[in-house]
Image (tube, rainbow, N blue to C red):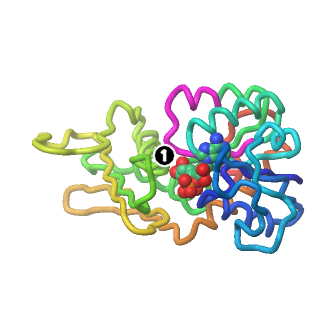
Amino acid sequence: MKIGIVGAAGRMGRMLIAAVDAADGAVLAGGTEAAGHPDMGKDLGELAGLDTAGVVLSSDPKALFAAADAIIDFTVPTATAAHAALAGETGTVLVVGTTGMDDVQQGAVTAAADKAAIIQAANFSVGVNVLLGLVEKAAGILPDAYDIEVLEMHHHHKVDAPSGTALALGQAAAAGRGVNLDDVACKARDGIVGARPRGEIGFATLRGGDVVGDHTVMYAGPGERVEITHKALSREVFANGAVRAAVWGCSQKPGLYSMKDVLGF
Ligand code: NAD
């Protein structure tokens, strides 16, 4: 199976090159970056700190989509929207890890899923997907006297907030309570904001250092507090999950899938 990596010189891109290299039955079809990237033309294996792979970094996603069975995309929202359109044209499987998409960019991904298998997840780690299930279940059991707060911390390069995973956790908690997250979310607090409304789902964002991704969902009730935490210690967990999704996607019909579908939850 031939797998291409768009955004191959990024933090996740380099991890993904190594994950494809280590996966049984997977071959690196190529990798792209935006035109003008300083690593353009470099060998992908060397970019990831491995032996020479014999394929170099290019700025031609169209050729990569035509040559690969599946593409993995951890880039930026504008690029992912364009890549989704290419997946729609070529029918190539697309794994989307990019977060922070607006409605129009997300619409491009959803539209392309009519023509190609697309697997999209805010977090490709198996552990976080277990966490999503636990959070929904706990929110369904605990009454709304238990205030739900989602706390996340990431490295100081991260550009979107709250993280895509924090929002997915908020959605899981809202689903457990049978409410719509948009109706109850409080994504930031500053100044005299008043008392916390019952039923609110709050978010708190920390940024610093090289933290790969910590998430805690807190249920603060009368006289007790339940906290469920996941800590990613290496980006490898996301890369391995994304490669697993790419392989799985190659035997699926067109449609929009999640990591839960890949793992069979
Ligand atoms: P990064 O900035 O290190 O990498 C992004 C790369 O995309 C950069 O190298 C950039 O040059 C490249 N890029 C930009 N425009 C491009 C284009 N038109 N064509 C090809 N490449 C292009 O960021 P990162 O830490 O690797 O994270 C990337 C994204 O993945 C972020 O949205 C992040 O939140 C998300 N992420 C998701 C998960 C998950 O499990 N879903 C895990 C980690 C990170």
| Left or right side of 191 for 27 | right
| Amino acid type of the residue that numbered disc 1 sits on in the rendered structure | Ala
Above or below, comparing residue 247 to residue 44 in the picture: above
User: 86 or 229, which lies in front?
Assistant: 86
Count neighbours of disc 1 (C-alpha within 10 A) and say few if under 14, some if 14 to 19, many if 20 or more: some
Tell me, yes or no, if residue 73 can be seen here. Answer: yes
| Residue that label 1 marks | 168
Asked if residue 123 shows in the view, the reply is: no
Q: Which element carries disc 1, helix, strand or loop?
A: helix
Picture coordinates of residue 232 (x, y %)? 52, 67
The percent position of residue 216, horizontal first and vertical second, equals: 39, 60
Instruction: Give the side of residue 2 with respect to residue 58, left or right.
Output: right
Q: x and y percent of residue 49 in the render?
A: 71, 73
Q: Quadrant of residue 94?
A: top right
Q: Answer with left or right where residue 208 lies relative to residue 109.
A: left
What residue lies at 67% left-to-right and 44% top-to-bottom? 35
Q: Residue at x 28, y 40 (%)?
A: 199
What number of labels is visible?
A: 1
Range of magenta residues:
94-109
- Residue at x 71% of width, y 66% of height: 47
